[in-house]
Image (tube, rainbow, N blue to C red):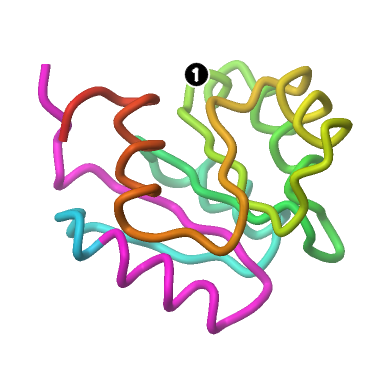
Amino acid sequence: MSVDMKMPVLIVDDYATMLRIVKNLLKQIGFENVDEATDGGAALHMMKLKKYGLVISDWNMQPVTGIEFLRNVRADADLKGTPFIMVTAESKTDNVIEARNAGVSNYIVKPFSSEILKGKIESVLGKI
């Protein structure tokens, strides 16, 4: 089964430069429909209004962190099945375990290339 490159993707990061970088990487891979949010609270609101095929969220954000956002998504009956990739600057084992326990689909450590991002997306959604 191939991935629908027109499906909506939501990227969440409180750092505008990182949003731009991830959006550009997604466009390089071929995704056309990319929305942005600057924190987990805003992103959760957006997810209630629109169905996303993938969420890529930073861990370290305020006021709602990526892990809190992930837990909120997994606790919502309508959203819990949404594929969710967590992005972080830290590769601490505790963080990976916490994200896995919260239901993350995959995990990326910064910095990363479009090839790494594509591989993580394919591991979650299937071949691109």
Asked if residue 23 is among those painted magenta in the image, a careful observer would answer: yes
| Apparent side of residue 6 relative to residue 94 in the rendered image (left or right) | left
Residue at 73% x, 43% y is 69
Residue at 68% x, 72% y is 14
Secondary-structure class at tag 1: loop
What's the residue type where badge 1 is placed?
Answer: Gly
**Which region shows up in magenta?**
1-26
Q: Quadrant of the C terminus?
A: top left
Q: Position of residue 16 (x, y in %)?
A: 57, 82
| Apparent side of residue 72 relative to residue 43 in the rendered image (left or right) | right
Q: Residue furthest bottom?
A: 17
Q: Which residue is at the front of the view, 56 or 74?
A: 56
Circle 1 residue: 81
Dot 1, how many residues are within 10 Å of its Cα: few (below 14), some (14-19), or many (20+)? some
Q: Which residue is at the front of the view, 108 or 26?
A: 108
Q: Position of residue 30 (x, y in %)?
A: 15, 55
Is 35 rendered above or below residue 124?
below
Q: Quadrant of the N terminus?
A: top left
